[in-house]
């Protein structure tokens, strides 16, 4: 995930031209130029995607390509996609809401929420905040993951919480790495946060998301459980139909589905609604980040990946990929700008998303909304 952003960062820094968004009629043409000349998107591999832009109080949505490979139907902001690792933003937001209500504390050691039978002495001292920041030195996936991967197109379907506990109980941290406080991206961190949230509240992760995030935000088409008609079709790089992922665990890391309209509601409220119920938690999620092992420009935040040094302001970004869907969301808080891209292919759209964000921020020269012009 971080390596994708490193490549995108290098690509975007090489783009010299400033593209100004003068009108919505010009917007699609500008994005089409980016697709043609500046991005790695190929419609042979990605049948269609939706681009949703928040620019202050203005909202723009543009569709590209088709909803399926055998029709001319276009995608809309109401079409649902599995958002993969973008789920981590919502898990962090949930944890911060629980902390606000003093149900948990970010300083709590995680072993206090786990059954004593799986206690691992080498994990003592590890906190909820460490999980949020990826400051744990866990591998990306558990070392016993492959044994449970019965269906390569649906890899998390059979990996249970008991399997996760078995990994946790036997894991041996690399003590040499402990001397460095640098983040290393791992899905395990957020799988454990799912367990902690459920144990702290005696409520399922899915119900917690509805209670604390989706219902208050009126995100009416976001969730975990779905039927075959809930989600838009997805495609692999070969353009063959993909399999929707299901989760016996790891839903908090990869398992949320949503659409451009719902994701836009979250960020638009954050930018423009002073009474927004989740504002305090959203602010808290942007209060801390630490360097990663990958690149000094890329930090790991509390649910976000944070890109530093490219603009006067930090860029908060996250992307996610499943068997047949790709999701990207990035924002700059100070300029109240954000870009959301959802695609019906596993091929990434991060490079296009960063370019669109750069365009609406005037080649990174745009000043914050509260700064003198």
Image (spheres, helix red, strand yellow):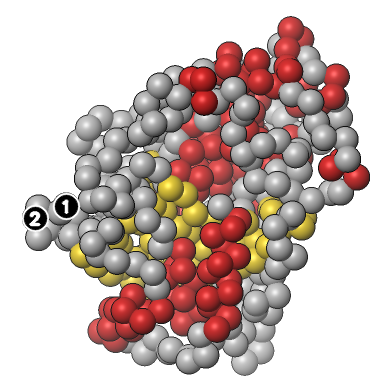
Q: Give residue 240's quadrant in the image.
A: top left
Of the numbered discs in the image, which one, if any, rests on residue 71?
Answer: 2
Q: Does residue 212 appear to the left or right of 25 in the view shown?
A: right
Q: Give residue 100's quadrant in the image.
A: top right
Mark-to-mark CA distance, 2 and 1? 6 Å
Q: Does residue 128 appear to the left or right of 28 in the view shown?
A: right
Residue sitting at the far left: 71
User: Residue at the spot x=90%, y=45% of the render?
Assistant: 179
Q: Check disc 2 and report its element: helix, strand or loop.
A: loop
Mark 2, other Cα within 10 Å: few <14 / some 14–19 / many ≥20? few
User: Residue at the spot x=80%, y=18% of the render?
Assistant: 120
Task: Tell me if label 2 and label 1 are in contact, CB under 8 Å.
Answer: yes
Residue 369 in view: no
Residue sitting at the far right: 179
Which residue is disc 1 drawn over? 68
Mark 1, other Cα within 10 Å: few <14 / some 14–19 / many ≥20? many
Q: Does residue 237 appear to the left or right of 218 in the view shown?
A: left
Q: Check disc 1 and report its element: helix, strand or loop.
A: loop
The percent position of residue 169, horizontal first and vertical second, equals 73, 17
The percent position of residue 194, horizontal first and vertical second, equals 59, 28
Residue 236 in view: yes
Closer to us: 229 or 266? 229
User: Residue at the spot x=32%, y=35% of the render?
Assistant: 244
């Amino acid at each position: 995930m971080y390596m994708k952003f490193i490549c995108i960062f290098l690509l975007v820094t090489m783009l010299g031209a400033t593209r100004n968004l003068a009108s919505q009629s010009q917007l699609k043409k500008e994005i089409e130029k980016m697709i043609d000349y500046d991005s790695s998107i190929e419609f042979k591999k990605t049948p269609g995607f939706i681009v949703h832009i928040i620019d202050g109080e203005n909202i723009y949505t543009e569709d590209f390509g088709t909803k399926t490979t055998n029709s001319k139907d276009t995608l809309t902001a109401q079409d649902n996609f599995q958002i993969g690792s973008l789920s981590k933003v919502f898990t962090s937001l949930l944890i911060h809401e629980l902390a606000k209500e003093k149900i948990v504390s970010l300083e709590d050691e995680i072993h206090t929420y786990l059954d004593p039978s799986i206690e691992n002495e080498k994990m003592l001292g590890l906190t909820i905040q460490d999980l949020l920041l990826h400051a744990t030195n866990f591998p990306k996936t558990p070392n016993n993951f492959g044994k449970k991967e019965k269906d390569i197109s649906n890899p998390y379907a059979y990996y249970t919480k008991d399997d996760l506990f078995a990994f946790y109980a036997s894991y041996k941290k690399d003590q040499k790495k402990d001397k460095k406080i640098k983040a290393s991206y791992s899905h395990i961190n957020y799988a454990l946060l799912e367990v902690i949230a459920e144990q702290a509240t005696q409520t399922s992760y899915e119900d917690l998301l509805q209670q604390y995030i989706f219902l208050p935000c009126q995100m009416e088409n976001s969730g975990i459980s779905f039927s075959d008609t809930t989600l838009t079709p997805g495609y692999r790089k070969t353009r063959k139909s993909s399999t929707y992922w299901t989760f016996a665990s790891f839903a908090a890391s990869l398992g949320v589905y949503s659409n451009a309209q719902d994701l836009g509601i979250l960020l638009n409220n954050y930018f423009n609604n002073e009474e927004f119920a989740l504002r305090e938690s959203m602010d808290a999620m942007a209060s801390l980040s630490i360097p990663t092992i990958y690149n000094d420009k890329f930090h790991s935040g509390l649910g976000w990946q944070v890109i530093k040094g490219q603009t006067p302001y930090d860029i908060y970004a996250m992307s996610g990929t499943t068997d047949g869907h790709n999701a990207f969301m990035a924002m700059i808080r100070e300029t109240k700008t954000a870009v959301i891209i959802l695609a019906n292919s596993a091929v990434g759209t991060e490079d296009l998303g960063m370019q669109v964000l750069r365009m609406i921020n005037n080649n990174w020269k745009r000043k914050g909304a509260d700064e003198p012009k």
